[in-house]
Image (tube, rainbow, N blue to C red):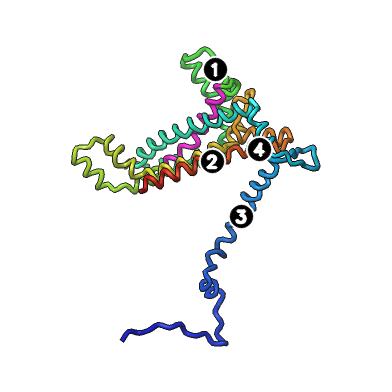
């Protein structure tokens, strides 16, 4: 005879506890999420809404009452040659650094995935460029690129490559090269450690079977390893692209957008216009130009991942 389970009626003296009440009504998850949602609303949602409002007004440090001006700040930025140069700088900076960080990150991840002495110590040392605060590492790079005391210039002159050193941060092309080098150095550990975690999930039996079938190491890596860790690579690319497009500290410490605005990114230009020049509305409009670019990057990568998964 099948036993029937029935809910025991609750008497008047046996009221449910708060935990039972929350669980029964299905609101416990929302209660646990509430602190995180409040933090996101306070530190992300409110500043974003404020930036939207500022971008459609003529608010500045000197004005007490802001007037609604619609999209004038956005169209005015598009007509600015400095803004156009900044957009090109942002895409060049992001594209070059992400490609090099991916290439070097994969190489270091494969190397760290091998067995050798002091492997754990080497992995810990690999994280140092990423762990060090950006401002501190930028100051170190500022010394390395110094026109007078640069270590790079000392090596170039002493080795006979050139008669005099390079003005790393004083010329437009070299200044852009300098911030790209510094960003690559800082971002490689994030790629390497993340991809290393993906490499350690690859089934060794698949690689051994391919080796028995006559596949070369490159073929095993390209046709087996890369497809298996592709989701990890795409996630790392997504995070790195978002972080690089919105980069501020490294560039501002090294060049402050100079010389002659040749290294401005959207973040540094928005800061200069809003804070240093006092044009809050124009600075907010410039910063919001990053938003659609980031949305396109996120949606494109997520769609590609979903298509690859199916």
The overriding secondary structure of the stretch rendered in magenta is helix
The spot of residue 285 in percent (x, y) is 66, 38
Q: Earlier in the sequence, mark 4 or mark 2?
A: 4
Numbered tag placed on residue 294 in the rendering: 2
Numbered tag placed on residue 39 in the rendering: 3
Q: Earlier in the sequence, mark 3 or mark 4?
A: 3
Magenta segment includes 175: yes
Q: Is residue 212 above or below residue 78?
A: below
Give the label, 1 or 2, closer to the camera.
2
Give the farthest residue toward the left: 213
Q: Earlier in the sequence, mark 1 or mark 4?
A: 1
- Pointers 4 and 2 in contact (CB under 8 A)? no
Q: Is residue 97 above or below residue 65?
A: above
Q: Is residue 28 above or below residue 269?
A: below
Magenta-highlighted residues = 173-193
Between the C-alphas of marks 3 and 4, the distance is 24 Å
Give the label, 1 or 4, closer to the camera.
4
């Amino acid at each position: 005879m099948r036993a029937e389970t029935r809910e025991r009626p609750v008497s008047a003296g046996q009221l449910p506890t708060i935990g039972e009440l929350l669980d029964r009504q299905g609101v416990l998850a929302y209660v646990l999420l509430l602190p995180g949602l409040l933090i996101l609303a306070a530190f992300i949602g409110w500043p974003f809404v404020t930036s939207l409002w500022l971008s459609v007004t003529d608010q500045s440090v000197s004005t007490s009452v802001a007037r609604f001006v619609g999209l004038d700040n956005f169209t005015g930025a598009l007509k600015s040659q400095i803004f156009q140069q900044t957009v090109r700088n942002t895409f060049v900076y992001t594209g070059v650094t992400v490609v090099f960080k991916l290439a070097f990150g994969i190489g270091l991840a494969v190397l760290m995935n091998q067995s050798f002495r002091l492997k754990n110590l080497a992995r810990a040392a690999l994280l140092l460029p990423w762990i060090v605060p950006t401002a501190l590492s930028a100051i170190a790079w500022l010394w390395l690129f110094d026109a007078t005391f640069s270590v790079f210039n000392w090596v170039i002159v002493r080795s006979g490559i050139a008669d005099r050193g390079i003005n790393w941060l004083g010329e437009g092309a070299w200044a852009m090269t300098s911030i790209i080098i510094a960003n690559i150095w800082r971002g490689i550990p994030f790629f390497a450690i993340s991809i290393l975690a993906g490499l350690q999930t690859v089934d060794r039996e698949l690689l051994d079977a391919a080796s028995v079938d006559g596949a070369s190491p490159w073929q095993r890596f390209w046709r087996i390893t890369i497809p298996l860790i592709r989701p990890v690579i795409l996630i790392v690319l997504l995070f790195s692209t978002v972080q690089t497009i919105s980069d501020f500290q490294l560039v501002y410490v090294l060049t402050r957008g100079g010389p002659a605005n040749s290294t401005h990114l959207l973040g540094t230009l928005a800061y200069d216009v809003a804070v240093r020049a006092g044009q809050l509305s124009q600075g907010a409009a410039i910063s919001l130009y990053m938003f659609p670019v980031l949305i396109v990057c996120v949606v494109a990568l997520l769609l590609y991942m979903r298509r690859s998964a199916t």
